[in-house]
Amino acid sequence: MIPTEDASARKREIEEKLKQEQETLSFIRENLEKSDQLTKSMVSILSSFESRLMQLENSIIPVHKQTENLQRLQENVDKTLSCMDHVISYYHVAKDTDKIIREGPTGRLDEYLACIAKIQKAVEYFQDNNPDSPELNTVKARFEKGKELLEAEFRNLLNRYSKPVPPILILDAIGVDEELEVQDDGVMEHLPQAVLQDIICIAGWLVDYGHNQDFMTIYFQIRSNQLDRSIKGLKDHFRKNSASSGILYSPAVQTKRKDTPTKKAPKRPVYIPGTIRKAQNLLKQYSQHGLDGKKGGSNLTPLEGFDHDLRVKHHSDTLNEKHGATTGKDDVLDIEIDSYIHCISAFVKLAQSEYTLLTEIIPEHHQKKTFDSLIQEALDNLMLEGENIVSAARRAIMRHDYSAVLTIFPILKHLKMTKPEFDATLQGTAASTKNKLPTLITSMETIGAKALEEFADSIKNDPDKEYNMPKDGTVHELTSNAILFLQQLLDFHETAGAMLASQVLGDTYNIPLDPRETSSTSSSTSEFNKRLLSTYICKVLGNLQLNLLSKSKVYEDSALSAIFLHNNYNYILKSLEKSDLIQLVTVTQKKAESSYKELIEQQIQTYQRSWVKVTEHLTDRNMPVFQPGTKLKDKERQVIKDKFKGFNDGLEELCKVQKGWAIPDKEQRDFIRQAQKRVVSDAYRAFLQRCANISFTKNPEKYHKYRPEEVEEMIEKLFDTSA
């Protein structure tokens, strides 16, 4: 059983909790009642707000719609007014732009183009909206007038500011040093920058809006004329300065001015005017006096070691005496050649500069065609001048004046050197334009090869004319001219080799074609051309040797014939060695040098045999045998007298004759004298010694006319016309 006290306590505890719960419940009920009241109040407020919003919306929406309609109407009115103003402006365009259009674009291009744009828009409007209106014809006429004046302005600007490039600037451009670290790009300013921008602007408008291509014709005509005038101006300047100062410019020589920094000379082949003229004069003299049957002298170019005092005349001296009147013509020819070479280089530089200018003005798809037309006049004039040079050379060759080919060499060399740059400049032009330079090169190579061949034949077929033979046995003019001609080939060996190769002369010279040498590589081609030229030179030398041998038979005296051949062979050898021609010759003839030395030695021996008729009297043949103190018989004394007399007469005769012969080479002359002195002096001394104690005459001084020293002195005076 639970105790009574515990039960009472438990009951009180429960009652207290119950009381607390009832109080809590009562509090909750009160709060719920308050919440219900608040909810009802909020619902009432919201309902009232909703009602007011609906009333407001019903009032505002009609007002908003009405306002929107009014705004739209206002915008439509504004747009209509704007369109009306815009349309009305088209009707006033002709009047508003009349003054500016009539006065033209000069000095106000931007304003003028803006007026043209207004007129163009008016034309478009009337075409689209009112094609039958008279205003359309008015604005069309105004637009065409504006376009016409723009084209005229284009022409005027080009004409006014296009000037020939000054010659000094051209010379600077073609003398740019390729080795300089900082290079001048050689760009020439043909037009002032402001003018150029106007021209570019006009050209762009004419293409884009004017649909006009006539300005391109105007452009190439004006610029073509300036290009041609620039080249002609250079030519005139060149001639004037060359004639007045004697200074002949070269494309490889930098023209120095006060405002131009000094530059190194570029590595370009240099044509030195005057070097060709001397050879031309000599060869021309030969062709006129040798081949034509007139009397010619024994003139040759002196070599080191040749004595000028022995009637070895310098060609230029003879020419000054005989052909002084032609010197001026030769100077003019030099100037013409050098001028032409300069003009070729100038054309390339100017054409490149013109193309750079053209690309800024002419639309891209018209640039090549316009450039082709632009360069035609200047290019045709240059090619015509080149063809005239070829024609002149052809006529000269027909007259057997083979020196004309020497005119071709420097020009052809320069043309071939310039061809890569020339081709690059003309890239994209018509085939007929690009083929003009190769055609000229081919013509020059053809006529050059013809001249080379005919020159070789002329050396072979030069007639043996007794009156044209040197009386003193010195070098024949044929020899000196042949060597001089070959020396000029050495200066242009690559050009000459290419000439021969261009005519497929390998078959003529029986040169085997090595597949490696017929390849496209420059080194193998150069080697083949070198061999071809070497073979040609050997052919000329072979023809010369055969002709000299034939000519030597004209001399009745075999000793003089030997001296003649000796002089010519020696001159050939020394010339080959001095000019380095020997290096070219040995490409195909390894033993050429030793062969000439052998020929020279043979002629010396032949000459020395002429003294046998002198020295044979000093031999023991028919010499009487006697004992000392024995009296000689009359017959024996006569034998000794005859020996003395034969020696004296032979010595005097030979010395008298051979004193008038010539050996220009001092070294060879001294060698032959010494050798002859030694042979004759030794034999004479031995003979005198044998006859020293023989009494063969009462007047020994009659027979013993010369002492050995006197004999040596007489021989020492051989080949000395001054003795």
Image (spheres, rainbow, N blue to C red):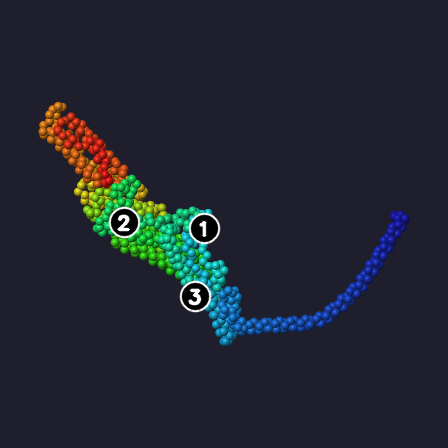
State the residue at coordinates (15%, 30%): 700
Label 3 near label 2: C-beta < 8 Å?
no
Earlier along the polypeptide chain: callout 2 or callout 1?
1
Determine the image quadrant of residue 628: top left
Secondary structure at numbered mark 1: loop
Dot 3: few (<14), some (14–19), or many (≥20) neighbours within 10 Å?
few
The residue type indicated by label 2 comes to Glu
Q: Tell me the mark number nearer the camera, choosing from 2 and 3.
A: 2
Q: Position of residue 386 (x, y in %)?
A: 33, 56
Secondary structure at numbered mark 3: helix
The residue type indicated by label 1 comes to Lys
Dot 2: few (<14), some (14–19), or many (≥20) neighbours within 10 Å?
few
Q: Position of residue 521 (x, y in %)?
A: 36, 48
Secondary structure at numbered mark 2: helix
Q: Which residue is mark 1?
A: 258
Label 1 near label 2: C-beta < 8 Å?
no
Would residue 618 appear left or right of 666 to someone viewing this image?
Answer: left
Q: Is residue 370 visible?
A: no
Q: Which residue is mark 2?
A: 321
Quadrant assignment for the C terminus = top left
Q: Which residue is mark 3?
A: 214
The residue type indicated by label 3 comes to Asp
Q: Position of residue 469 (x, y in %)?
A: 21, 45
